[in-house]
Amino acid sequence: MDFKEILELIDAIDKSKLTKFSFKEGDTKIKIEKKTEDVTCIQQSSQNDNGDLKIKDKVDKIEPDNFEYIKSPLIGTFYTSPSPEEDVYINVGDKVSKDQVIGIIEVMKVMNEVKCNYDGIVEEILINNNDTVEYGQDLVKIKVL
């Protein structure tokens, strides 16, 4: 791998959502890790009599919404229902409870149930029926109650 290809690789990873990447080809080994930073917001008050802006010294951290993700526990094929003829386990907007089955991952002809870890509401389903999933991949976004 030449220097230009390495720079293109770094640029592609920087623009992606990946936080870790490793590559090995022959004697060449590349490991890249991105650090995520907390987002901060500076509050400012309205203009004073002199027309100058006053900026508060206090910097508040933006609190994220109370969302969690159900992640894939295995590598395999994800199914949204027990069989093609049956209804899907969950839909966007459904209320789900802890240990409720939200899908199935098939690994070597063995069907493995994927269960919800939280009580909440399905905000977004991030994977389609019959898609191949990776270990740790986000499957469903849940608004935790």
Image (cartoon, helix red, strand yellow):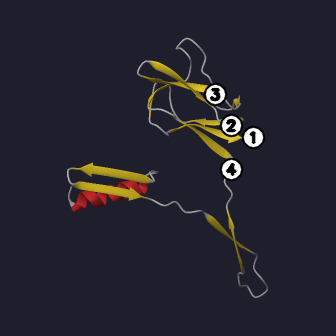
Image position, residue 54 (x, y; %): 72, 81
Q: Residue furthest bottom?
A: 50
- Label number found at residue 91: 3
Viewer-side residue, 81 vs 113: 113
Give the mark, 3 or 1, whose residue is nearer the N terminus.
Answer: 3
Q: Which residue is mark 1?
A: 145
Residue type of the residue flagged with mark 4: Asp
Q: Is residue 124 above or below residue 27?
A: above
Q: Is residue 71 above or below residue 22?
A: above
Q: Secondary structure at mark 3?
A: loop
Give the mark, 4 or 1, whose residue is nearer the N terminus.
Answer: 4
Give the mark, 4 or 3, whose residue is nearer the N terminus.
Answer: 4
Q: Is residue 115 above or below residue 36?
A: above
Q: Residue furthest top?
A: 85
Image position, residue 69 (x, y; %): 60, 41
Q: Is residue 113 above or below residue 67?
A: above
The answer to whether mark 3 and mark 1 are in CB contact below 8 A is no
Residue type of the residue flagged with mark 3: Asn
Q: Which residue is mark 4?
A: 65
The answer to whether mark 4 and mark 2 are in CB contact below 8 A is no
Image position, residue 125 (x, y; %): 58, 34
The answer to whether mark 2 and mark 1 are in CB contact below 8 A is yes
> Around disc 2, counting alpha carbons within 10 Å, would you say few (fewer than 14), some (14 to 19), or many (20 or more)?
some
- Label number found at residue 81: none
Q: Which residue is mark 2?
A: 118
Residue type of the residue flagged with mark 2: Tyr
Residue type of the residue flagged with mark 1: Leu
Whole-Å distance between the Cαs marked 4 and 1? Answer: 11 Å
> Around disc 3, counting alpha carbons within 10 Å, would you say few (fewer than 14), some (14 to 19), or many (20 or more)?
some
